[in-house]
Amino acid sequence: MLHFFLLILKIIGWILLAILGILVLLVCVVLFVPVRYELDGKCNGTIDTLDVKFRFSFLLHFLAGTVCYTEGKPTWNLRIAWKRFVNQDTELQETPIKKSEDSESSVNNAKDEEINVPEEPIKNEESVSEESITKESVTKETVSKETVSKKESFLDKIEYKYKKIRDKLREIARKKEKVMGFLTNEIHQAAFLKVISELKRLLLRLRPQKIMGEIEFGFDDPAWTGQVLAGISILYPYFADCFQIIPDFEEKKLRGQLEIKGKISAKNFVALGLRVILDKNVRMTLRHIKTFK
């Protein structure tokens, strides 16, 4: 009996160990197996000639997909193991034209439903004048009452909005010193610098392995071109050696080609999160943010 009981415990232990091993294997796969991606794009001057293809794969193409944009139409397909998903373009069908018989019947029904207006009896001129005077007086009174009520409601709305804005300004002035003290605290500033440095490290590790190309762009408004160029210049130092950007402030255009290859691993994000959470200044800053009012 004891031998049989020990055999059952041994089987249960092996099952639990197998489940634990599978879980550890799945965690390692998610953390250390990267998602590989490729991006190819080209354009000959206008957005209509834009041709972009993005491909990604994970775990020896167990999960793979492609997203394309050609001739102004986006297409995509996704494959998970042996199951494939593809977008299907559905065209709208035109509604059939009504038959002539239906139109004729509707016209006939409309003719039958014409309204016959009965003739009103002719009234005396005195009665008509008295009725018109009373109606004019009633309408004047109602109009005057409506204008007075509208003015009162309008003034009430203005007074309510004024009080609401005044209360908000007082609350902002009351919290101004508290907010400035929170921002100028040495602990909070150290936490902010820690987060910024970790984000920079993450960007360096997520840098594509290969990036080549040349893009010439421009908008109708030169201000838009300058704003886009300013946004690109933030990341430009990371790929300045192999990628060229040419802005055109005089003409609207989009011309060039681009090729990018790289990979992304979940371990980089997990490492960033652990380093940030384990930092003493960051934890204290988060605690202060929760209690900040």
Image (spheres, rainbow, N blue to C red):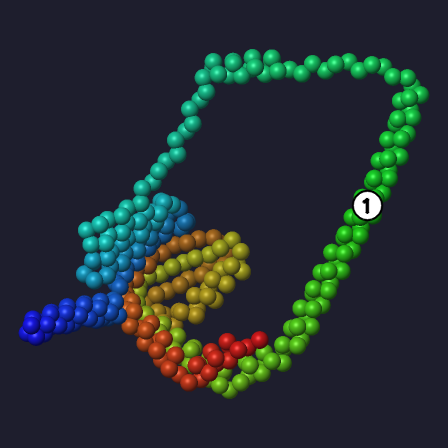
How many marks the image carries: the answer is 1
Instruction: Pick the residue in front: 134 or 181.
Output: 134
From the viewer's perspective, is residue 266 above or below residue 129? below
Name the kind of residue labelled 1 in the image: Thr
x and y percentages locating residue 97 in the rendered image:
44, 22
Quadrant in the picture for residue 37: bottom left
x and y percentages locating residue 15 in the rendered image:
15, 68
Q: Does residue 25 appear in the picture of this structure?
A: no
Q: Residue at the spot x=23%, y=54% of the render?
A: 80
Q: Does residue 150 appear in the picture of this structure?
A: yes
Q: Residue at the spot x=86%, y=38% of the render?
A: 140
x and y percentages locating residue 187 in the rendered image:
49, 85
From the viewer's perspective, is residue 270 above or below residue 82? below
Residue identifier under label 1: 147
- In the picture as drawn, the residue positioned furthest to the bottom comes out as 186
The answer to whether residue 251 is left or right of residue 114 is left
x and y percentages locating residue 171 in the rendered image:
66, 72
Q: Residue at the spot x=46%, y=20% of the render?
A: 98
Instruction: Pick the residue in front: 46 or 203.
Output: 203
Q: Residue at the spot x=53%, y=78% of the render?
A: 291
- Image quadrant holding the N terminus, namely bottom left
From the viewer's perspective, is residue 78 above or below residue 167? above
The answer to whether residue 39 is left or right of residue 26 is right
- Image quadrant holding the C terminus, namely bottom right
Badge 1: residue crowd in 10 Å (few <14, some 14–19, many ≥20): few
Label 1: state its secondary structure.
Answer: helix
Quadrant in the picture for residue 201: bottom left
